[in-house]
Image (spheres, rainbow, N blue to C red):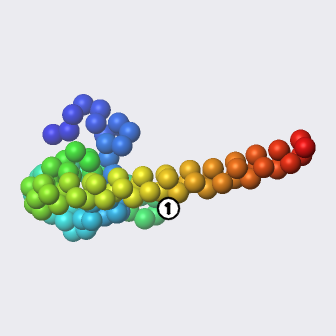
Amino acid sequence: MAEYGEWNRKGATLSDVTAKAEYGVSRDFIVKGIQTGKLEYREGSIWGNPYLRVLRSQLEKYIAEELGEDYLLRLKNQTELRRVKKEISDLKKRLEGLQQRKNELEASIL
């Protein structure tokens, strides 16, 4: 059972599409977990497209049981690495823009 307020906490839930991107699990895998009673879910729809919302904590526990703890840890690390690389790339682009602006300002002062 979900903790009180867990469905409303930021980052505590994810859609089946996000679960596929972050953990590499299919919608069928999630539906199997729902049918076995290991995952709680809520149905949603955006622009007429249905999706399933599940609790991240329950999904991680279910993945660890079905596919192994090593699989879960490797995927979590890959996801974090992807996020860090993206942030580094964004910061490099921002730094290049700031460097260019600095050079323009220095040139205008002289």
**Residue at horizontal 32 percent and vertical 46 percent from the top:** 13
**Residue at horizontal 31 percent and vertical 64 percent from the top:** 20
**Residue at horizontal 36 percent and vertical 43 percent from the top:** 11
Q: How many labels does the image show?
A: 1
Query: 104 and 74: which one is in front?
Result: 104
Residue under numbered circle 1: 47
**Residue at horizontal 86 percent and vertical 48 percent from the top:** 107
Q: Can residue 61 be seen in this view?
A: yes
Q: Residue furthest front?
A: 110
Query: 94 and 67: which one is in front?
Result: 94
Q: Quadrant of the C terminus?
A: top right
Helix, strand or loop status at disc 1 = loop
The quarter holding residue 71 reads bottom left
Is the residue marked by circle 1 packed among few (<14), some (14-19), or many (20+) residues within 10 Å? few
Q: In which quarter of the image is the N terminus?
A: top left
Q: Is residue 52 visible?
A: no
Q: In this view, does 62 lie to the left or right of 27?
A: left
> Residue 23: horizontal and vertical position, in percent?
27, 60
Q: Is residue 78 above or below residue 2?
A: below
Q: Residue furthest top?
A: 4
Three-letter residue code for mark 1: Trp
Q: Is residue 58 left or right of residue 11?
A: left
> Residue 92: horizontal and vertical position, in percent?
57, 54
> Residue 98: horizontal and vertical position, in percent?
70, 48
